[in-house]
Image (cartoon, helix red, strand yellow):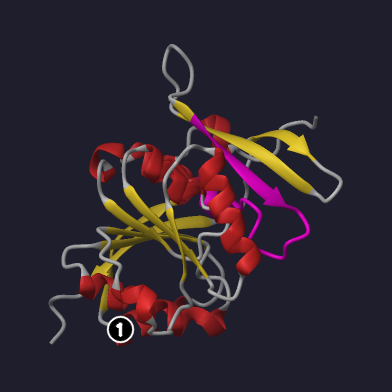
Amino acid sequence: MADGDGDGELVGRTASMTTVSRHFFGDGPDGPAFSISIIENMKEEYGLFVWPCSVVLAEYVWQQKSRFAGANVVELGAGTSLPGLVAARLGCDVTLTDDAGRLEVLDNMKQVSQLNNLSCKVVGLSWGVWDESIFSLFPQFILGADVLYETSAFDDLFATVSFLLQNSPGSVFITTYHNRSGHHLIEFLMVKWGLKCRKLLDGFSIMPSSKASKISGDIQLAEIVLNVDKA
């Protein structure tokens, strides 16, 4: 048994560097409303670790629970899938996606869904690739935690987001990201793909102090929609 890490409580570790962390949501008089258990692998480069952006986005989904209740949700680049699993816990119809070639990550997504007794669909979805999987998705909410990381992937990401938003009129892409360089590229690609930012928040402004004190970085949360006013 190990001590807690980040937002979650670390509840198990194996020799293969796999851990199970628990993340709590809600703080009522009788304790948290629920918890989500996440399988993490410390040897994975990106996909099997709960990053701070995921914690912030999951908290936002929880705080917006009345807005999300019963919605159709797709998480892009889901990895450990914390935001999507919170949405599923709120009664959403959730599809968790990650790169189709990352079989270990996709398998972990299936395991973590079962671990939490949730029925999430798991789909291999590579950004910018127009295969059968993307045409069956009609989300009201698209989630993406720290998907604005590799600048070389930004164009494919926004192409995919734009397609999904057009496929589901009135839908919104909600993403959390570290405020790194690359803003000019993000702004350019949003214009290119007919998108606009509807809301921009300091990620820490939505976090309970008990969680905010355990994560670091300059994290922003953006709600992005189709720019219907574009000529």
SS label for mark 1: loop
Q: The N terminus appears in which quarter of the rendering?
A: top right
Asked if the magenta segment contains residue 77, the reply would be no
For the question of whether residue 152 can be seen, the reply is yes
For the question of whether residue 185 can be seen, the reply is no
Q: Residue at x 38, y 74 (%)?
A: 133
Which residue is nearer to you in this view: 66 or 192? Answer: 66
Q: Which residue is mark 1?
A: 193
Q: Residues within 10 Å of mark 1 (few under 14, many from 20)?
A: some
Image: magenta residue range: 35-55
- Outermost right residue: 15
- Outermost top residue: 29
Q: Residue at x 22, y 73 (%)?
A: 167
Which residue is nearer to you in this view: 170 or 151? Answer: 170
Q: Give residue 32's position: percent from left, percent from top.
A: 48, 23
Seen in the picture, residue 1 relative to 152 is either above or below; the reply is above
Q: Give residue 173's position: percent from left, percent from top.
A: 33, 63
Counting labels gives 1
Q: The C terminus appears in which quarter of the rendering?
A: bottom left
Q: Give residue 150's position: percent from left, percent from top.
A: 58, 76
Q: Quadrant of residue 196?
A: bottom left
Seen in the picture, residue 169 relative to 214 is either above or below; the reply is below
Q: Quadrant of residue 127?
A: bottom left
Q: Residue at x 46, y 45 (%)?
A: 85
Amino acid type at image mark 1: Trp
Seen in the picture, residue 106 relative to 82 is either above or below; the reply is below
Q: Residue 110 vs residue 160: left or right?
A: right
